[in-house]
Image (cartoon, rainbow, N blue to C red):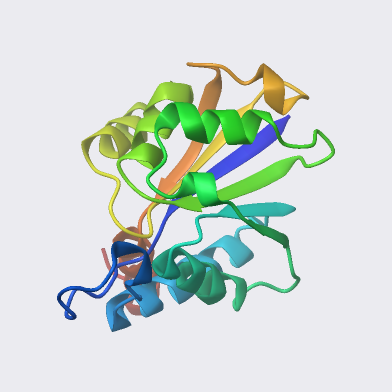
Amino acid sequence: MLRLMLLRHAKSDWSSSGMQDTARPLSGRGEAAARLMGGYMSSHALIPERVLCSPARRTRETWAGIAAQWPAEAEIVFEERLYAATPQAVLSIVRAQDDATRTLLVIGHNPGLQETAELLIAAGDVELRERLREKFPTAALAVIDFAVKKWSRIHDRSGRLDRYVIPRSIAAATNWRATGSG
């Protein structure tokens, strides 16, 4: 089995007009969301063996925020082709990965990541699939499992959505557990 995790970068800061898109940093809210998602991933054993990350500043900062919450380092590759990538480009990059890597995290941008997830998912919780289709907000994470042993064998509609998580749902679950109410 192979596991692909698609993570959209956290919320970026738009306060500086005229800044190059690739140079935009995370906002304070984005930094907090990256740390929250990193903690969630760590506590749910969602630590990848390899990370492919767009070179944009906001994706690098998202990576730093999540990785700081992990118990061990993962191999990181900053992949130029992930910036503004189409689903076909994302799939081409994923399919070229070494088959020794069983769990892969891609940190990138929308609409490419959401469209990639939609293209790959054929099964999984119907409600979660619908929520993913409706919106893939900043710091959203889609975890997709494939019943193959080679990345090159991944194709359209071949994955099962294991989970779809957004920072708001983690925060809500944490608050619910802390207060003991729903």
Q: Position of residue 104 (x, y in %)?
A: 65, 45
Q: Residue at x 34, y 69 (%)?
A: 171
Q: Position of residue 163 (x, y in %)?
A: 47, 42
Q: Quadrant of the N terminus?
A: top right
Q: Residue at x 79, y 37 (%)?
A: 98
Q: Is 87 on the left or on the right of 99, as rendered?
A: left
Above or below residue 95? Residue 174 is: below
Question: How many marks on residues?
Answer: 0
Q: Quadrant of the C terminus?
A: bottom left
Q: Residue at x 40, y 68 (%)?
A: 58
Q: Is 129 on the left or on the right of 70, as rendered?
A: left
Q: Is 100 on the left or on the right of 59, as rendered?
A: right
Above or below residue 80? Residue 91 is: above
The residue sitting at the right extreme is: 100
**Residue 179 in view:** yes
Q: Residue at x 64, y 54 (%)?
A: 51
Q: Quadrant of residue 27?
A: bottom left
Q: Is 74 on the left or on the right of 23, as rendered?
A: right
Q: Position of residue 144 (x, y in %)?
A: 54, 35
Q: Quadrant of residue 17?
A: bottom left
Q: Quadrant of residue 86?
A: top left
Q: Position of residue 156 (x, y in %)?
A: 49, 16
**Residue 125 in view:** no
Residue situated in front as seen by the camera: 21 or 163: 21
The residue sitting at the bottom extreme is: 28
